[in-house]
Image (spheres, rainbow, N blue to C red):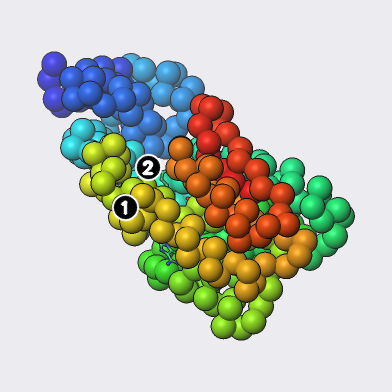
């Protein structure tokens, strides 16, 4: 097949066989081409026999090449959908995951059962990355007073941009876990976090795509992946109100360990482990 003057279907055929050969998702070609042509799926089909402008063809080939070498598609196109909204992502932030949408779903259901119809509840999202959790919570539950933190200034820049683009009124603070609140002696109603939880020695288990391209500070957490939860157990009692609601995303298999930590830190609390749609323990409340 000639490389110049590709029609849409020729570009897609080239990409899908190249991606398949390289053991990548063959649908990546369609996503990338739609991104560069700025069309919906239907626009792509309607123009199956239309020739692609030269500069777009060059960009498309480069992008497929990058993905074949391991760059996640979301970093190439610069965004990911989360809870029905588009979040900007750069290599400085974790690409928000569908598992984390399930954390939002559960928290939204638990808020009324813990707090009734109370307004103005304070919610913090610790380690906000792209801002996915904090921004989604504010937009889904506008009466919350939402603060998001991260240790990384670069992440916070991305999160602030997302909050601006999506029109979410969220406060952003740089800081180490709950320290900013402890320093100000501020107490909180709802504390959420999807902290790093991948065991260091499990690097092999992680796909090469993630290891090579997503920030390690967002992923790895000591030998057993539990370092951040241990630190939270020391800091939580200083800031959580009673009644209060704590929600963690966890790695599969960590449910009972994290639940036990919470039970010994808060003997009077109701602790539950929730499973994701793939049947893995994924959240502790
Ligand atoms: N909340 C985002 C999400 O769910 O997509 C990102 C979660 S990512 C697994 C963990 C985040 O925690 C990263 O953005 C990382 O920069 C941040 N982080 C790492 N260590 C931290 C610390 N000591 N204090 C606050 N944030 C931290
Ligand atoms: N769910 C992410 C992954 O498996 C990890 C996120 C985290 O460490 N909190 O790639």
- Give the labeled residue for mark 2: 74
Look at 42% across and 37% down and name the residue there: 38
Q: Which one is in front, 253 or 99?
A: 253
Is there any visible trace of residue 78 in the rendered image? Answer: no
In the rendered view, does 47 fall on the left or right side of 14? right
**N-term mark: 1 or 2:** 2
Q: How many marks?
A: 2
Residue 148, image quadrant: bottom right
Residue 275 is situated, as x and y percent measured from the top left of the image, at 57, 34
Left/right placement of residue 8 relative to residue 149 reads: left
Give the numbered dot on residue 223: 1
User: Residue 151 is drawn in which quadrant?
Assistant: bottom left
- In this rendering, the answer to whether 25 lies above or below 271 is above
**Could you tell me which residue is drawn at 62 percent across and 73 percent down?**
238
Look at the image and tell me in which quarter the N terminus lies: top left
Mark 1 surroundings within 10 Å by alpha-carbon count, few (fewer than 14), some (14 through 19), many (20 or more):
few
- Tell whether label 2 touches label 1 (CB within 8 Å): no
- 128 or 199, which is in the foreground? 199
Residue 133 percent location from the top left of the image: 57, 53
Ligand 1 falls in which quarter?
A: bottom left
Please tell me which residue is depicted at 68% across the width and 57% down the height of the picture.
267
């Amino acid at each position: 097949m000639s490389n110049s003057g590709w029609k849409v279907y020729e570009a897609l055929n080239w990409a899908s066989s190249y991606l398949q050969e390289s053991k990548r998702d063959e649908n990546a070609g369609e996503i990338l081409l739609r991104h560069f042509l700025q069309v919906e799926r239907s626009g792509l089909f309607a123009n199956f026999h239309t020739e692609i402008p030269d500069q777009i063809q060059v960009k498309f080939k480069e992008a497929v090449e990058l993905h074949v070498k391991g760059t996640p598609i979301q970093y190439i196109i610069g965004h990911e959908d989360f809870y029905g909204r588009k979040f900007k992502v750069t290599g400085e932030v974790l690409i928000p995951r569908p598992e984390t949408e399930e954390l939002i779903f559960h928290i939204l259901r638990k808020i009324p059962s813990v707090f009734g119809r109370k307004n103005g509840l304070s919610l913090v999202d610790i380690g906000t990355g792209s801002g996915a959790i904090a921004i989604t919570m504010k937009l889904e539950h506008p009466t919350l007073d939402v603060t998001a933190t991260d240790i990384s200034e670069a992440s916070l820049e991305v999160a602030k941009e997302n909050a601006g683009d999506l029109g979410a009124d969220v406060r952003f603070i740089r800081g180490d876990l709950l320290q900013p609140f402890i320093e100000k002696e501020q107490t909180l109603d709802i504390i959420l976090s999807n902290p790093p939880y991948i065991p260091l020695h499990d690097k092999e288990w992680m796909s090469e795509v993630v290891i090579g391209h997503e920030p390690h500070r967002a992923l790895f957490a000591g030998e057993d992946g539990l370092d951040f939860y241990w630190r939270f157990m020391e800091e939580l009692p200083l800031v959580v109100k009673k009644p209060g609601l704590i929600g963690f995303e966890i790695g599969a298999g960590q449910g009972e360990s994290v639940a036990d930590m919470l039970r010994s830190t808060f003997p009077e609390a109701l602790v539950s482990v929730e499973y994701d749609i793939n049947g893995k323990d994924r959240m502790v409340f």
